[in-house]
Image (cartoon, rainbow, N blue to C red):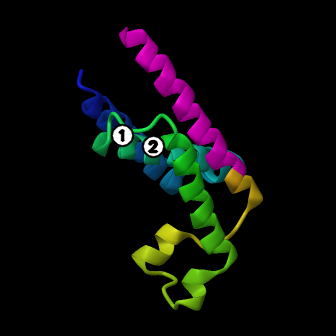
Amino acid sequence: MKPRLGYLIAAAVLLAVEIWIGMYVCDAFIRPYGGDILVAVLLCCLWRCVFPKGSSRMPVYMFLFCAAVEAVQLLELPRRLGIEGTVLGILMGSSFSWLDLLCYGAGCALFAVAERWALSQRK
């Protein structure tokens, strides 16, 4: 299977799981923490769909992107810009949490380990 197709399938499955979590899971662990871990993995998979042979440091860069989004939440930019409730405002999020950063880091690390393992299996 071509690398892009594998990442695309993984991204589609993760997106479906994220939507399912968002619609049907109302707990104190999976929705707030599991969803954040999975969204970091989803973003890494989407990046690899476009750039399959990119830098091995990409998970670190993706974590920095996630941290930047969290900083936007800390600064309450969606509210200050008057875009709360819009698609962009929803994507930016509304509440800062240090635990979110931890979850994003775990998701990026999980992606890096899984990718390294998958690459070693192809050889």
**In the image, which disc is placed on residue 48?**
1
Residue 41 can be seen in this image: yes
Quarter of the rendering occupied by the N terminus: top left
Badge 2, how many Cα within 10 Å: few under 14, some, many 20+?
A: many
Residue at 31 percent of width and 41 percent of height: 49
Q: Which mark is residue 113?
A: none
- Across and down, in percent, residue 3 comes to 29, 28
Residue 64 versus residue 14: which sits nearer the camera?
A: 64
Check the image and name the residue furthest to the right.
98
Splitting the image into 4 quarters, where does residue 6 fall? top left
> CB atoms at circles 2 and 1 under 8 Å apart?
yes
Determine whether 65 is above or below 60 in the image: below
Picture quarter with the C terminus: top left
Q: Amino acid at mark 1?
A: Arg
Q: Position of residue 21 (x, y in %)?
A: 52, 49
Q: Looking at the image, is 1 positioned above or below residue 49?
A: above
The residue wearing badge 2 is: 44
The magenta stretch spans residue 115: yes
* Front-lying residue, 29 or 63: 63
Secondary structure of the residue carrying numbered label 2: helix
Identified by mark 2, the residue type is Cys
- Range of residues picked out in magenta: 102-123
